[in-house]
Amino acid sequence: MDKRFRALGAMSAFFKVIAWVVLILGIVATIVVTAVGALQARRGVSAVLADVPILNQTAGLLPALLLGVGVLVVALIKFVLLYGCAEAIQVMLAIEQNTRETAYYLRGENQIPPPPVASSWEEDEAAAR
């Protein structure tokens, strides 16, 4: 049976890649935000980070940890949503393919192929000799 809707399969793969990228960037951002906050707790807010909207408010260890946890939670939620979209597309494609195969066999256009027969490793070894 040929596969249809190749663009949806590509979109599913794209969503999975983007989901993993978002998760990795979220973990990196969590580490950076927590580290910057911990450094600012020791040294104070630097002139470089004073203009950055989020990082200038992490001038303590507790706010840095809370902001880091918040960034990680948002990254996890985005990961789950993107990965879930990819899986939903794959489920729809599987339903379409199974429905098409069932209709194909019900119309009598082809016989249902027999199930595969399990082979033993002993048979494979004997055939190789």
Image: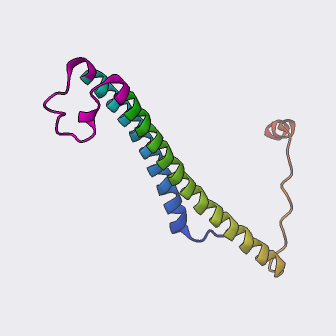
The answer to whether residue 13 is magenta is no
The answer to whether residue 62 is magenta is yes
Up-down relation of residue 49 to residue 13 (above or below):
above
- For the residue pair 56 and 76, the one nearer the viewer reads as 56
What is the quadrant of the N terminus in the image? bottom right
Where residue 119 sits in the image (x, y, percent)?
A: 85, 44
Up-down relation of residue 90 to residue 56 (above or below):
below
Give the residues in magenta: 41-64
Which residue is rendered at x = 86% and y = 35% of the image? 122
Is residue 1 visible to the viewer in this orientation of the structure? no
Where residue 74 sits in the image (x, y, percent)?
A: 45, 44
Where residue 125 sits in the image (x, y, percent)?
A: 82, 36
Colouring chosen for the image of the structure: rainbow
Horizontal side of 63 relative to 96 (left or right) equals: left
Q: Quadrant of residue 89?
A: bottom right
Is residue 41 visible to the viewer in this orientation of the structure? yes
